[in-house]
Every structure is written in C-alpha cells, then in structure tokens.
Image (tube, rainbow, N blue to C red):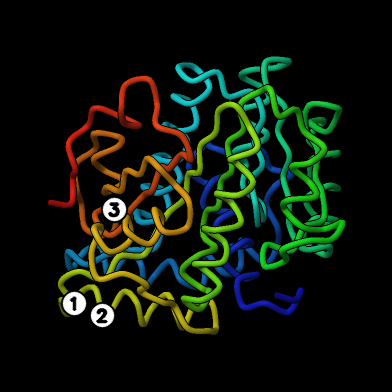
Amino acid sequence: MSDSSPISPTAHYTGYVWYRNGLSDPALTTTEGRILFMSLHPLMTASAALGRPSLETYLLARHRAIDLLLERAIEREQITQVVEVAAGLSPRGWRFTRRYGDRITYVEADLPAMAARKRAALERAGSLGERHQVRDLDALKDSGPDSLPALAGELSPGAGLAVITEGLLGYLAPPDVRAIFRRVAATLSRFERGRYISDLHIGGAQTIEVRGFRVLLSAFVRGRVYLHFADAAEAEATLRQAGFADVKIERATAVTGDPPTRGAALAHILEASTLLSARGSIDDRSHALQ
C-alpha cells in the first residue's frame, strides 16, 4: 500500500463527518474533507429523502459501534493499550485519551504522509504525548520497522491490547484481508488480553440498494470496494482459520442498540480475540445477523 492509495479521500471525508457530528476537534478536519462533504451533501440528502442509504449514516453507525466495543474492552477486559491501524483523521484517539487519561496508551498508525498530517493535527489539538502517539505503519507489511509486529513489540505484553481497523478492509483484495487477519491474530497472541475490532463488508443478499451503495462507495474512493464474505458465518470461519479463538460479527446497530435505519443497517462489525474469554465468548449478545 502506498501513499497514493485510493483510501485517502475517505480519511478527509470521514474527518469532516466526525467533526460535523460533534465527535472531533476542528484540528482534525481538512479543507479537502469539507469540500468533499459539501460536494456530496446534495446527493446524500436526496438519497436519504428517498429512503436509501447515505454515507454519513453508514459511517456514523460503524464509528459509534467500534467506540462502544473499545469502551467495553477497556472497562471490562482491562485493555490498556490501543493500536489503531490506518487511523486517518479518526478522532477516536483524541476522545479516548481525553476520557481515560493515564489509564490507556493510544497509538495511531498510518502511512507516512497521513501520519505526518495526523501528528501535526494532534499537536494543534494539544493531544500528543507519551500516552497518545502517531506512528508510521504499513498495514500490509509482515515485518520491518513500520510493521504492526514491530510496533506491538514496543508495548507491554503483560497488559491488554486492542487493535482497531476502521474503513480499511473493504478497499483491500481478499488475500490482503486474510493476511491482515493472520497478522493481527499473531500480534494479539503475544499479549495476555487482546481484542481485534473492525468494520467488515458483508455481501449477503445483494439487493438493488446494497449494489447501489457499493457502486457509490467505489466511486467515492476512486477504487474497488470489496464484499469479501457472503455472510457472517463465512467471515467467522476465515477469522478462526487466521488464529482467532473467539469471534463475534454483527450489525453495528445491534452493537449500539440504535434503530437499523438505511445506511446504518449496512455497517457490520467484528470483534475477535485469540483467547476464549472467561465467559466462554466475547459477549453474551445473540448473533444479530442470523
């Protein structure tokens, strides 16, 4: 993956979405993001008026669901270290370090150009420090100084670690996604407690709306958007083959308890661990995709 990756437009767009909805600091917005949002806003408004999915509701659903699962991991599972891979302009590190202070160490990681931009933004927001860092990382590397295993090697294996990917997997080819699953599982297996939390694109019933939303996303990111799995069962089997022992996949709205409005209902979230929890599973929630 290079800095010319087609994922970059979403980093700017989502940065503005988070700010617009009260989830971010002005320092984490960009002119590019504001222009992208304003240019798409009439289309998104029309889509919502017709009862069709919109990017904003989809993005907010997945972001809030991941936030909630990370909050639970910190509060219930004693997760004290977080690595957010391909963090872009996500405000999650800013918000969680403000909330939890010295209780957590939050490391945001991305390709060098975006990492530099994020680092400068967090400096303006007054958030960078020992407990909140931005590091260069290539999500597709197995080894080397800018790889996930190398970065995780600097953290404490006796403390819990959560790895987060948001807005990344859908733009990667299936072999790259499987490799990321294996890489994250191998990384978490070195820690006493761990969680992998991510959004996930599920195919399922390919309705006209799902196909249309996929075309919209593909046009927006200027590249292909993959639907890697036909259903949650297939995704769960792939994650287990990658080394995870405990897997839960459900709709974002099932995680948050929000109404499954169009757009929001298309967002799916995975939560996985390499160890079976003391409860025997990650959560007592029923499988929301069945």
User: Which residue is label 1 attached to?
Assistant: 206
Left or right: 49, with 117 as reference point: left
Left or right: 222, with 246 as reference point: right
N-terminal of the pair, mark 1 or mark 2, is 1
Q: Amino acid at mark 3?
A: Ala
| Residue at (42, 75) in percent of width and height | 217
Tell me the quarter of the picture where residue 65 sits.
Answer: top left
Q: CA distance from mark 3 to mark 1?
A: 16 Å
Q: CA distance from mark 2 to mark 3?
A: 15 Å
Q: Nearer the viewer, residue 220 or 34?
A: 220
Q: Please tell me whether residue 255 is drawn above or below residue 284 in the rendered image.
A: below
Left or right: 83, with 236 as reference point: right
**Which element type, helix, strand or loop, lies under badge 3?**
helix
Q: Amino acid at mark 2?
A: Arg
Q: Nearer the viewer, residue 267 or 263?
A: 267
N-terminal of the pair, mark 3 or mark 1, is 1
Q: Please tell me whether residue 209 is drawn above or below residue 80 in the rendered image.
A: below
Q: Quadrant of the N terminus?
A: bottom right
| Residue 211, label in figure | 2
Position in image of residue 17 (x %, y %): 51, 52
Mark 2 neighbour density, 10 Å: few (under 14) some (14–19) many (20 or more) = few
Q: Please tell me whether residue 33 is drawn above or below residue 68 in the rendered image.
A: below
Mark 3 neighbour density, 10 Å: few (under 14) some (14–19) many (20 or more) = many
**Which element type, helix, strand or loop, lies under badge 2?**
helix
User: Which residue is label 3 attached to?
Assistant: 264
Task: State which mark lies toward you, 1 or 2.
Answer: 1
Q: CA distance from mark 1 to mark 2?
A: 6 Å
Q: Amino acid at mark 1?
A: Gln
| Residue at (72, 52) in percent of width and height | 148
Q: What residue occupies the far left of the structure in this picture?
A: 290
| Residue at (59, 40) in percent of width and height | 189
Marks 1,2: beta carbons within 8 A:
yes
